[in-house]
Image (spheres, rainbow, N blue to C red):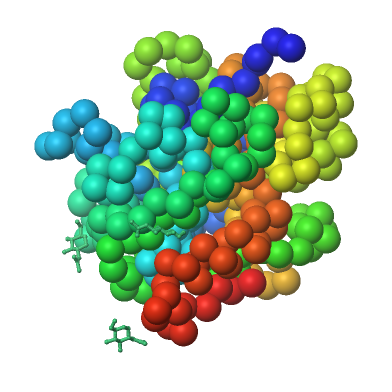
Amino acid sequence: MQMHFILLGFIRMFNLFEGLIIQKSHQETERSPKIIGGVVSSKADWPWQVAIFTYQNDVMKPVFLCGGTLIQTDVILTAAHCLASPSVKPDQLLVVAGEYDRTIEEGTEQTRSVINITLHPIYVGNSPLLDGNDIAIVQLNESVLVTEHVKPIPRVTNDVAQVKASQRCFMTGWGVSDVASVGKSKQPLPTKLVVAEMTIISNRECNRRDQWDGIIVPTQLCATNKRTSACLGDSGGPLSCWIQGQYHLVGVISWGPKTCRGKPSVCTRVSAFKTWIEDTLATLHSPNGSQKQGHF
Ligand SMILES: *[C@@H]1O[C@H](CO)[C@@H](O)[C@H](O)[C@H]1NC(C)=O
Ligand SMILES: *[C@@H]1O[C@H](CO)[C@@H](O)[C@H](O)[C@H]1NC(C)=O
Ligand SMILES: *[C@@H]1O[C@H](CO)[C@@H](O)[C@H](O)[C@H]1NC(C)=O
């Protein structure tokens, strides 16, 4: 089998996935020449999106590593490959919530250290794309303060039927958004959080010969847009779907086509990990477990 996919967020220059970047709200948005056919998100639309930084190589200069999603005030969900290849320790990470423009201090950011990383136990570092367990839980050193710009996603989805019925799903991230720069060593990353509206397709459709040709497993989920003309995004970040009046976390962005065109983006299917997430949260928060209840 020829490998035409790449990890998203493994190395910064490979933070790619495809999608038509669209405007969620006409207010407060602006066009950026670096985002093909799209716009940056509105400032407080995705308050559960976090940015994960690492100081693996240079203690003084944390570098952007991946996206993530606040699922509780002190817990984020992200992609296992972000933290496992190469492997990072909790004290090499910083999590920033309330981030919007990465280049400036906006006064909305809240930075936290990491005290525990739990990779999915069946995650296999060598083949995260294929095993479908590209998911990890990261515990922060203390809760974030809930504000307009920082708050956990309202629900972590547990119902596949709801997801199928959902018409509006969005990927968000700070990944590469300029198709022209794909494959070049210095790809400009957008400074502001960008958003792409995605359509979830069935795994059967995603596994068609002209799509991912059978490699998608049930614990993964594919999202696409027929008129793909852009790529953006960061592994670990959310696929957020508007279901029955609130946003649900449906996917963790995992990988996508190398060329940023022509094939669906692949997420870890969050509903498949409901029990694992609940069990892990209970462990993390014991003996004070009563304080935390998942929103399942
Ligand atoms: C949590 O981490 C942040 C960022 O490193 C730090 O500023 C803060 O003091 C820490 N909080 C506690 C309770 O240690
Ligand atoms: C991290 O959390 C897991 C539960 O998911 C627990 O088993 C492990 O002991 C924790 N590690 C630390 C260093 O607290
Ligand atoms: C959490 O545990 C600490 C001591 O370990 C205790 O002082 C505190 O009251 C507990 N909080 C809750 C909400 O149970």
State the image quarter where residue 67 is shown: top left
Give the vertical position of 223 relative to 292 (above or below).
Answer: above
User: Quick one: quadrant of the N terminus?
Assistant: top right
Residue 139 seen in the figure? yes
In the image: residue 133, left or right of residue 221? left
Percent x, y of residue 190: 39, 34
State the image quarter where residue 229 is shown: top right
Q: Nearer the viewer, residue 143 or 210?
A: 143
Percent x, y of residue 295: 58, 74
Report the number of discs.
Answer: 0
Dividing the image into four quarters, tell me where ligand 1 lies.
Answer: bottom left
Give the residue displayed 35% in from the left and 45% down from the top: 52
Give the vertical position of 64 relative to 188 (above or below).
Answer: below
Furthest residue toward left: 60
Give the vertical position of 146 relative to 101 (above or below).
Answer: below
Residue 42 seen in the figure? no
Percent x, y of residue 45: 48, 60
Give the residue displayed 38% in from the left and 34% down from the top: 87
User: Quick one: quadrant of the C terminus?
Assistant: bottom right
Q: Nearer the viewer, residue 171 or 158?
A: 158
In the image: residue 52, left or right of residue 217? left
Give the vertical position of 85 relative to 202 (above or below).
Answer: above
Give the residue displayed 76% in from the left and 64% down from the top: 159
Percent x, y of residue 218: 78, 43
Give the residue displayed 67% in from the left and 30% down from the top: 130
Q: Nearer the viewer, residue 28 or 91?
A: 91
